[in-house]
Image: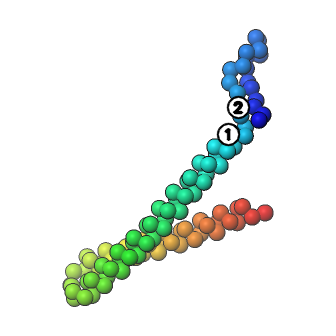
Amino acid sequence: MKSKKCGNSQNNEPIYGINEKALHNRILAKKKQAYHITNASELLAVVVNLVVGCLLFALNLYKESTNMFLYLLAAWMIVTGLYVLVSRIRRLKENTRMTDP
């Protein structure tokens, strides 16, 4: 493995060294971890918002409730789930476009 050393030019003592291969591997590992966390959190946000929004809407219809707040909450959760889904699709398209030559 190649490592570059930077040092004091007056007495040729190395101050620190950089292992480029190890640094590159660490960056790739961090990138993979960030992708995994982002993927899981986006999917969780989409599923939870859509399921709970639909469930709230269905329960309000079943109870024949006149509480507009619950209908607005259900609509807000469905819109939020769809927004996260659209943002995820755009991000994935952008990532594939950037990695393709």
Residue at 45% across, 71% down: 46
Residue at 35% across, 76% down: 53
Eyeballing the image, is 53 above or below 17? below
Inspect the image, locate mark 1, and give the three-letter code of the amino acid beneath it: Leu
Inspect the image, locate mark 2, and give the three-letter code of the amino acid beneath it: Ile
In this view, the residue in front, 64 or 5, is: 5
Circle 1 — which element? helix
Q: CA distance from mark 2 to mark 1?
A: 8 Å
Judge left or right: residue 66 versus residue 76.
left
In the picture of the structure, the residue carrying the numbered disc 1 is 23
Q: Position of residue 63 (x, y in %)?
A: 21, 86
Residue at 78% across, 34% down: 2
In the picture of the structure, the residue carrying the numbered disc 2 is 18
Q: Position of residue 79 (x, y in %)?
A: 42, 75
Mark 2 crowdedness (10 Å alpha carbons): few <14, some 14-19, many ≥20? few
Q: Position of residue 57 (x, y in %)?
A: 31, 82
Eyeballing the image, is 59 above or below 101? below
Q: Earlier in the sequence, mark 2 or mark 1?
A: 2
In this view, the residue in front, 49 or 30, is: 30
**Numbered circle sitting on residue 71:** none
